[in-house]
Image: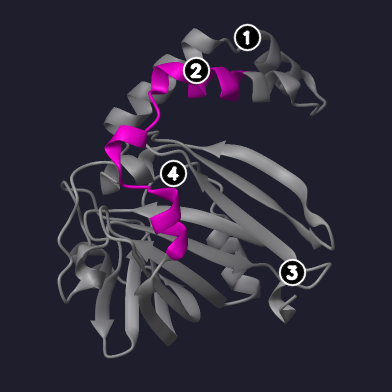
Amino acid sequence: MPPEAAPGKGAALLVLLPGWRETLRINGTVETDGLAVEEAFLHCGKAIIRSNLWGPATSPGDDFLAAAPFAVITSRDGNGNADASPKGDPQVIRQIGPSTIAIAERPGNRRTDTFHNILEQPEIAIVAVAPGDNRTLEITGTARITTDLALRESMSERGRTPKAVLVVETSSVHLADSPALRDADLWNAEHHIDPAELPRPSEIWTAHVKLNESKGLAARTIRALVNERMTRAGTNLDYRQNLY
């Protein structure tokens, strides 16, 4: 077992269901017999929508970085707890210097796990993919958060300027064929899941809220009032109005 996967280490997974716009984020601790799950939740689908991940294959050619619309950032906090966060854009990673890249912070599930983590532990890892391509671009480096106006405005999309940008000084960049992508046949549209065969995300989020055990009048009121139809309408409106 490699050192980074030693028992007791924090670990995180981002699970993709081919053809589905939401992702499953799982955080936990590595144990000798697997991953002890401490947190699992459904992430909103904005990163998938912005990246058009399940759309037509792209043609990265010699510039994979410029063509990749989807990436996963993994980070740890000061206690070693891990997180894997999806990022999506027409071009998700921008090169702004010889060894410096930038990723815009777009609207998502509002947890800002990555930002909280790098304030305590700035070393991160990134895996980027491009539809139709069985290669992955793996990047490691040291991250910081910036609100530099010129940089933010250079990364505007659809008239929306990101409120912050993640800037990474890279220490390693590796582009290679991925047996995992090949074996999963991830880009084969014939294997994509029909969303109608799965629970609506709004059903999952509604159940999550109702299972919340937070105390207090506000928490009890939310649990009593939330319903699937309201959650679905709110989610669809959010996806339309707050994609960027």
Tell me the SS state at disc 2: helix
Judge whether residue 60 is colored magenta.
Answer: no
Which mark, by number, is residue 13? none
Asked whether residue 26 is in view, the answer is yes
Q: Distance between the residues labelled 3 and 1?
A: 37 Å
Which marked residue is nearer to the observer: mark 1 or mark 4? 4
Q: Is the magenta stretch mostly helix, strand or loop?
A: helix
Magenta segment boundaries in residue numbering: 179-206
Graded by Cα atoms within 10 Å as few (under 14), some (14 to 19) or many (20 or more), the crowding at tag 4 reads many
Graded by Cα atoms within 10 Å as few (under 14), some (14 to 19) or many (20 or more), the crowding at tag 3 reads some
User: Mark 2 sits on what residue?
Assistant: 231
Mark 4 near mark 3, Cβ–Cβ under 8 Å?
no
- The answer to which image quadrant residue 239 occupies is top left
Which mark, by number, is residue 108? 4
**Sequence-earlier tag: 4 or 3:** 3
Which marked residue is nearer to the observer: mark 2 or mark 1? 2
**Sequence-earlier tag: 1 or 4:** 4
Which marked residue is nearer to the observer: mark 4 or mark 3? 3
Left or right: residue 54 compared with residue 226 = left
Q: Nearer the viewer, residue 113 or 139?
A: 139
Q: Where is residue 30 in the image (x, y as percent from the top left)?
A: 77, 62
Tell me the SS state at disc 1: helix
Q: Where is residue 124 in the image (x, y as percent from the top left)?
A: 54, 74
Which marked residue is nearer to the observer: mark 2 or mark 3? 3
Q: Residue at x 76, y 47 (%)?
A: 37
User: Mark 3 sits on what residue?
Assistant: 80
The amino acid marked with disc number 1 is Leu
